[in-house]
Amino acid sequence: MPGKISSLIILVFLYISVGTTKNCKVSNEVFKSPNLKCVPPMLGTEASPSTVCILPCKINPVKYKFRCNRNGQWDTEPNLQLCDDLKVCKNPWLTWTQWTWKCSLGHQHGSTCIGTCSTNPDVQAKTICQSNGLWNSDTDLDDPGHCKMKYLLLVTTGKMSNDTSLDSTELIDLEDSSSTCQPLPDFAYPVYSAVGGLLNGSPIICNGNDDFDKCCSLTHSNIEISVGLRLFAASVMVNDSLWITGGSAPHQAGSEMNSSILVLPNGETKPGPDLPIPVKDHCLVGINDNEYFLIGGYPEGKRTFKYNFVDGFWTTGPNLQSHRQDHACGLFTDMNDGRRKVIVSGGLGNAPPPYQSTSEILYFQDENASFEYGNSNLSNLETNTGCTNKSWTGI
């Protein structure tokens, strides 16, 4: 008898449980979305209890998860409008420049960014992009006391006036001209026309000369990465990877390249996006996490292009006022209006005098903006692009 009573109670409980569950419903718009994935599959526009559905957004990498409860209600109502309502927060790289950022979803809603203080790696901060387009941080990132910025400039390798390649390295304190920085080790090879950046926090120098086809770390002698021969290339850091673009084969006229290569943080390489034109002696500058300008170079020294790593497309940018190759470019904050702008300076022209003494400035956030001449009191400059990417100038 005790066994029969227990069985009866269990059967009655199961009957009641099954009898009170309801299916969840979705709109025809959601059901017809090709991105909607449910486990187990939906029965028409209805889902059985405990069904879990994933709805990825088309316009961004955010995914929404919905679960059907036993009462026939979703824990969150499936709605395509959720994707359209997403806000984008300001780029933390441009807002808090003294921090190095790693973000899960860029600077879109739901992204979590971990910041590491550039001058003290032991100090970290976390901030989350909220639905209202504002960051929610666990630290007052606007308080300079949390991460004091120190501006240092690393200058390495190059060529002397007698065509001798250099292997020496100098560190310059941009805040105190009287300070003397500790000497850094010489580079493993004397090279000129090299490119480089910061890979895993360590300066890395690539290419240069007629036969240097690899990347080497300035501080770790055992790191060598093969990247192929390319002379007069340009580079920039794309998040944690080094993007090397264009260049030419040594001593081969008309051998300009439209290929590129990405050096990944783990030391591996993979092909980067093809450039819109074959080019050498150009420069690159990143304006945010995803967009990068290719500026000037040989043979079309006035042209500029912008690449977006999210959508994978090149677009044509505004022309420079002057033909420039072997020039420098970078990103700066205009102290007159507080806006971030691209600056291009020096280089070789295509008419006498050969060396340019002018600079040009672009306010890139205005789609109709054009390059305008800046101060013209520069000495005549021909400069390699090694000091142009933000990782070198923003150490």
Image: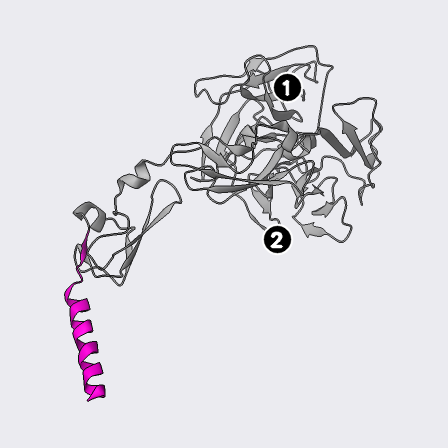
Q: Report the span colored magenta.
A: 1-25
Marker count (numbered): 2
Q: Amino acid at mark 1?
A: Asn
**Can you see residue 206?**
no
What separation in Å lies between label 1 and label 2 (alpha carbons)?
A: 38 Å
**Can you see residue 310?**
yes
Residue 142 sits in quarter: top right
Residue 10 colored in magenta in the image: yes
Instruction: Residue 257: give x, y in percent of width and height.
Output: 58, 39
Q: Earlier in the sequence, mark 1 or mark 2?
A: 2
Residue at horizontal 18 percent and vertical 58 percent from the top: 23
Q: Quadrant of the C terminus?
A: top right
Residue 372 colored in magenta in the image: no
Q: Amino acid at mark 2?
A: Glu
Q: Which residue is the site of mark 1? A: 350
Chief secondary structure of the magenta span?
helix
Q: Are marks 1 and 2 in contact (CB under 8 Å)?
A: no
Residue at horizontal 43 percent and vertical 21 percent from the top: 367
Question: How many other residues sit within 10 Å of disc 2, few (<14), some (14-19) or many (≥20)?
Answer: few
Residue 75, relative to residue 135: is it above or below?
Answer: below
Residue at horizontal 67 percent and vertical 27 percent from the top: 326
Q: Is residue 40 left or right of residue 161?
A: left
Question: How many other residues sit within 10 Å of disc 1, few (<14), some (14-19) or many (≥20)?
Answer: some
Q: Is residue 30 left or right of residue 179?
A: left
Instruction: Residue 117: give x, y in percent of width and height.
Output: 64, 37
- Give the camera-side residue of 229 and 376: 376
Q: Which residue is the site of mark 2? A: 268
